[in-house]
Every structure is written in C-alpha cells, then in structure tokens.
Image (cartoon, helix red, strand yellow):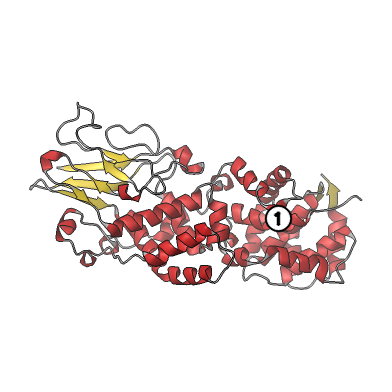
Amino acid sequence: MEYQFVVKLDGEGVREGLVIDAEKLVDGLKDFILFSHRIISYNNLIPKDISENEFHLYITKFEDNCFANVLEFKPRPTLNNYISIESPWQKAARKIYEGLKAFFGNNRKYFLDNYKISWERANLFKALRNMFPKGKTRSTIIVRKNKENILSCEFTPQFVSLANQWIELEKKETPKLVAKWKGSELVDDKIKIKAWLLSGELINFKFPEDSFKNLEFLELFRIYGDYNREPGKNTLAEITNVDRYHSIQDEFDVSEEQYIQSFSDDPEYEDLDYQKMVNLGYEVYKKNFPVLKLLGED
Amino acid sequence: MEFSYPKTLFLYVFRHIERYGELETPIYENRHYRELNYVSYFDILENGIAAIPSDPIKRIAFVYRELTNAHLIPDGNKQFAYFFLKMAFEYNSWEIKEKDTILLEFALKVAKNECEVDDIVEFIEKRLVPK
C-alpha cells in the first residue's frame, strides 16, 4: 500500500495534501510554509468520511519559534506508532526554511545586506524554490506503508539532494560567517542570535543512513540521499538552469510595493525618486538587455 | 542643457542589477557587488578625484570609463558601467540613440581602454536625443 502526499501549488488540495498558494510563494512568502508537515491527527482534523488507510499531509503555518512542528508525522492510531523526528532533519528543515523565508520573504533585502549570504547558497534557495514552480505539482514526500503495517517516509531524491547540498554549505560557511559577525560591532541582535544559532547548532548530519543512531528511525524513515539518485538527473545545476532564462518579470521575488519600500527605508536613498527609478530601471534594463547580455559574455 | 543625476543613481544601479540581473554571466551572483562599499566608491569618484569634470556629459562619461576600466569588481564591470551610462541619461529624459551592434562595439572599445573621456563624450553627443 502506498500513500503519496503531493504538495500542490494551485487548486485546493483536500485529500492529497495542503495547498501552498503560488501567489504567496512569489509574493513574499510570509505564510509560505514548506517544511512544517504534519499528518493531521485522526480524532479532530481528518474528516470522518476518509477511509482508514488514508492519510493527510497537513502543512501548518510556520511560526518563527515553532520549530517543534517541523516534520512531525502522526500516523493513525491503528498503526500504533508515533514518530517524532529528532533534531537532524528538524534542523536541516528549519535552516532551509529560514533560508527560503529570508531569501524570498520580505526581509530579503535585510538578509542579503546583513547576512552576507553567499551566492552559492542563494542559488540553492532558488533551486529549492524551483521545486515548486508556479502551476506545477511536485511531490516532496512519499509516505508508504509496508506489509507489516509500518510507515516509511521518503523525501524525494531531488529534495534530499538539495538539502544535502545545503547542509554541506552550512558546514563550510558557518565558521567563517560567525567569525565575521563576531568581529563586527555593527551587527544587531538579530544577527547575533542567528550567529549563535548557527555556531551552536552546526548540523551534524548526513543523509546516508549510517549517520542515524536510532534504528527505529532508520527503519521508518528511510531517506534517499544522493547515492540513490539517478546519475545526471536532478542535479542542482540542472534545476537552477531551468529558471535561468525565465523572463525578467519572473524574477520578482517580492511585490513591487515591498521593493519600493525597501528603498524608502534606506537612508542611502533619500534623494532618490523611488518610483521613477524603479520604473526607469526596469525599462532601461529591458531595452538594453541584448547589449548587456553580450557584454557579460565577452 | 539641464542635466543632473542623483548620487544614488550609482547605488540604484547596483541594486537594480542585483534585482534584475539574469544575464548569461549572472553578475548578480557576484558577491563582490555586495561587499563593495558603494558609498565610499562613489565619494571617491565624486570628490576624491580632482580631475573629475564638471560638465554633466563629461562627468558621466568619466564615471562610465572609470567603472568600465577600474575593475573594482572581478566580473561584470562592463555591464554595470553600461547600465549606469544608460540610466544616467534616461533619468534626465535623454537617450543615446544607436543600433545595439554599434553600442556594443563602443562599449567594448571603452573596455579595451581605447577611448578617452573626450572620445566617449563625442560618441554620446552625436547620438543624444531627447526622449
């Protein structure tokens, strides 16, 4: 028996998963919750007309301090098991989520300006975003039940691959970032907290199964890593290139109002006619794109 | 000719490239853009160089040439400079009207350090039309 929970971006998923609103995804992602998944508990949220073998994947709203909800799966009571995934995935998921939120959310400017995010990582966020393109449906998590009635949860190789890369980057970059932040007097509390979080909670996690100590966990949550991926498919490069030539308009990660507001909030831009510049810049960029492109190739 | 451009145009161009840059060599991926102290660099251009011309077109030509050749960032200097050039004029409702191929040739010539400021001014002035 197999259950497949599909995260949908359009339409209303009732039985198969919860909707992630594509508009929100593009429009700041304030409520975009990707990594807080929970199967709705049997007794209150699952409608009565659902058969015994059905599960719902419930994506909750993700509050900033609500990490406990990340990736908690509650099978129906007939299966008599309850699994709460411990830290590695939780941490990975949280970090990916935070990254996504920061990168695509309305604090993108703040993030980019203050966080000193590498573009390598930014591209990873982008790749993660591209897993959920507008108007398309992709599977993130597959839940299966075997003959012994035991649930297994598999993240799609594509997702896992990206998450793996994220973790590797995290390991590589964090010490440098923390050192940089600590050396700066300009960082505000938010950054300090972030630095502390990263330094204190470096992810000690690899997707290959030997990094898991909990055997039960291993059995129930067999997670595919890169080793399980078909060669040449779903590579990061491939995913990022998909969007490389999307129209300029698609590059709007935040609404125009938010973008203009980001200028208004910045004292550096006091003498700037924001709206005029925004409109003009876009117009000039479009008009001169062929030359700019060729100059870049040279 | 009434002509001015705000100091922040320079900054804006950076931000704009960050935002819209989706070129063959995506310069927005260049972290050095972000690490650059935009304001300081602009101040140097504006105030620190005694030779900076006061004539508005010459001034823009000067900044354009500087941006192209100073190599203050590893990649994307030409793109950035060119975008700045176009924006500086369009902001004042003027346009450099010319075929893309010639503009490209011109930009590459500047990048090869084959144009003095006066050459750039001459090129621009011949093609400058009100929008």
Query: In this view of the protein, which residue sits in the foreground, A286 or A94?
Result: A94
Is residue B108 visible to the viewer in this orientation of the structure? no
Q: Looking at the image, can residue B14 be seen?
A: yes
Up/down of A122 relative to A257, above or below: below
- Residue extending furthest left? A148
Query: How many numbered marks, from 0 up?
Result: 1
Q: Is residue B23 left or right of residue B116?
A: left
Residue A161 at x, y = what percent?
34, 59
Residues B28 and A62: in front is A62
- Quadrant for the C terminus of chain A in the image: bottom right
- In the rendered image, which residue does mark 1 sit on? A268
Q: Amino acid at mark 1?
A: Glu
Left or right of A210? Residue A58 is right
- Residue at horizontal 74 percent and vertical 55 percent from the top: B8
Crowding at label 1, few (<14), some or many (≥20) Cα neighbours within 10 Å? some
Q: Looking at the rendering, in which quadrant would you find the N terminus of chain A? A: top left
Q: Mark 1 — on which chain does it sit?
A: A
Location of residue A290 in the rendering, given as x and y in whole percent from the top left corner: 65, 54
- At x 48% / y 64%, what residue is drawn? A120
Kindly identify the residue that appears in the image at 25 percent across and 56 percent down.
A86
Q: Position of residue A279 (x, y in %)?
A: 69, 43
Q: Is residue B18 above or below residue B119?
A: above
Q: Is residue A185 above or below residue A218?
A: below
Label 1 residue SS: helix
Residue A165 found in image quarter = bottom left
Could you say which quadrant of the image residue A223 lies in? bottom left
Q: Is residue A16 above or below residue B42?
A: above
Q: Residue furthest top?
A: A49
Question: What x and y, as percent, mark residue A282?
Answer: 66, 47
Q: Residue at x 78, y 49 (%)?
A: B91
